[in-house]
Amino acid sequence: MSGLFVTATDTHVGKTIVTAAIAAAYRARRPQSRCAVWKPVQTGTRIDDGQADGVRLLRGSGLVQTMAQTVRVHFDEPIAPWMAAERSGCTISFHDLIEQGHEKLRDYDAVFVEGAGGLVVPLTERYVIKDVVRALKLPIVIVARAAVGTVNHTLLTIQCAKQADIPICGVVINGVTEDGARIAEENKKMIERFGGVRVLAMCPYVAAWEQAMPDARALREWLQQSLCTDGGQWIEDAGAGESR
């Protein structure tokens, strides 16, 4: 029973890309292992939309799962889960989510979970995303922006995780551009110095990455390469539930 929870400093930072890439890279390194990707709560698009997180998780990771196995709760509104549920006239059951999460952790060798927004995004009127992480007892990878302003957001996320006793594998800086490469490196230095965690990878910015790589295999190879710049041992450690 092992796994990893991918969170971020904000929404639209690249959690889906990174979660899919980690799962694909882990499968490439341990081809006999039984892996799964899981999105407990998805908001923002129709569940079958080509840009929905669940669809992109499967395409990027190469895993064969049904959408029901990939996404537990879904809302079309692009807002926080609690508000999306209220607008839909329903309630998210925190305990049902955790029960399914534990089932997946029992059934698979490694489960890669993508959160919604950041750690303190409201899930219900009582729970936020970090409560899911704590209940599942998973370490996290934090996905952060590459641009100016990301250091404050990232350090606050690290602080929040540490206060909640959530193990941190490290940070992935996503969306590095050629013009912004120096800023991204400086951000890396500051995050490692003041956050006390490793920056595991610096992923380049690619506009419409799926459209740019219509071949799913080429897409997965590119995603893996983006994360394995240091050899990628951290991916095996993370998939085994180990923080460094």
Image (cartoon, grey):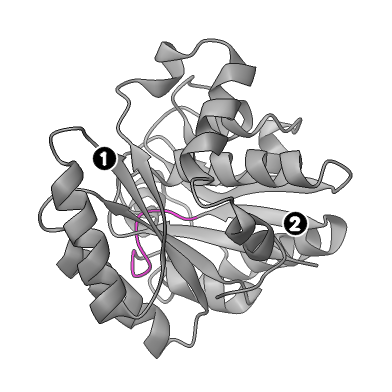
Give me the residue at 59% from left, 28% from top. Answer: 220
- Report the residue marked by disc 2: 110
Q: Is residue 10 above or below residue 203?
A: below
Q: Is residue 139 above or below residue 49?
A: below
Instruction: Give the image location of residue 158, x and y in percent.
Output: 34, 75
> In front: 36, or 236?
236
Instruction: Give the image location of residue 58, x and y in percent.
Output: 63, 31
Of circles 1 and 2, the one toward us is 1
- Report the residue marked by disc 1: 176
Q: Quadrant of the N terminus?
A: bottom right
> In front: 169, or 127?
169
The residue at the far front in this view is: 230
Name the side, left or right, on which 26 lies relative to 126: right
| Part of the protein shown in magenta | 115-121
Name the side, left or right, on which 148 lies relative to 29: left
Task: State whether residue 92 appears in this view.
Answer: no
Instruction: Give the image location of residue 107, x and y in percent.
Output: 86, 57
Secondary structure under the numbered disc 1 in the rendered image: strand
Task: Indicate which disc, 1 or 2, sits on the residue closer to the N terminus.
Answer: 2
Q: Is residue 205 above or below residue 209?
A: below
Task: State whether residue 220 appears in this view.
Answer: yes
Q: As shown in the figure, which amino acid type bears the numbered disc 1?
A: Val
Distance between mark 1 and mark 2 Cα atoms: 28 Å
Q: Residues within 10 Å of mark 1 (few under 14, many from 20)?
A: many
Q: Quadrant of the C terminus?
A: bottom right
> In front: 60, or 68?
60
Total residue callouts: 2
Give me the residue at 47% from left, 38% from top. Answer: 226
**1 and 2 marks in contact (CB < 8 Å):** no
Secondary structure under the numbered disc 2 in the rendered image: strand
Give me the residue at 70% from left, 55% from top. Answer: 111
